[in-house]
Image (cartoon, rainbow, N blue to C red):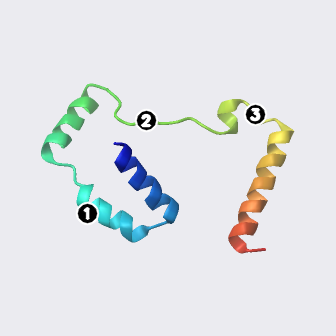
Amino acid sequence: MDELSAIIIKLQGDGDYNGVVKLLKQMGDVDNQLKTDLEKLNNAGIPVDIYFDQGVEVLGLLGNDNIKLILNYNSINYFCTFLKC
């Protein structure tokens, strides 16, 4: 699991589209047994995915003016970096 996580994080960090395509071809298939097991879990109402609630809304900081300034500053920095301004 650690090795697979490291591979995925490296592919994401490098933006390696071809590497992702290759990995999906090698490991992206869901065989019949796994498909059957996932259907059983779904039918039993057992969640199989992890979802993280995140952001200023979840933290209760949506109305905080300091957070708005930080978010605006970070957005401007991101777009300036992206657009090379």
Q: How many marks?
A: 3
Q: Position of residue 65 (x, y in %)?
A: 86, 40
Please give the name of the residue rendered at 68% of the width and 35% of the height, measured from the top-left corner: 57
Query: Farthest residue toward the front?
Result: 3
What amino acid does circle 3 point to?
Answer: Leu
Residue 8 position (above or below residue 58): below
What amino acid does circle 2 point to?
Answer: Ile
What kind of element bears circle 1?
A: helix
Residue 3 position (above or below residue 49): below
Is 40 left, or right, of 55 in this rendering? left
> In this rendering, which labeled residue sits more in front, label 3 or label 1?
1
Label 1: how many residues lie within 10 Å, few (<14), some (14-19) or many (20+)? few
Q: Earlier in the sequence, mark 3 or mark 2?
A: 2
- Give the quadrant of the N terminus: top left
Q: Position of residue 39 (x, y in %)?
A: 22, 36
Q: Position of residue 55 (x, y in %)?
A: 65, 39
Please give the name of the residue rendered at 52% of the width and 36% of the height, measured from the top-left corner: 52
For disc 2, the marked residue is 50
Label 3: how many residues lie within 10 Å, few (<14), some (14-19) or many (20+)? few
Tell me whether circle 3 and circle 2 mark residues in contact (CB < 8 Å).
no
> In this rendering, which labeled residue sits more in front, label 1 or label 2?
1
For disc 1, the marked residue is 25
Q: CA distance from mark 3 to mark 1?
A: 42 Å
Query: Farthest residue toward the left?
Result: 32
Residue 79 position (above or below residue 72): below
Label 2: how many residues lie within 10 Å, few (<14), some (14-19) or many (20+)? few
What kind of element bears circle 2?
A: loop
Checking the image for residue 61, the label placed there is 3
Please give the name of the residue rendered at 39% of the width and 55% of the height, measured from the top-left corner: 7
Please give the name of the residue rendered at 34% of the width and 66% of the height, measured from the top-left corner: 21
What kind of element bears circle 3?
A: loop
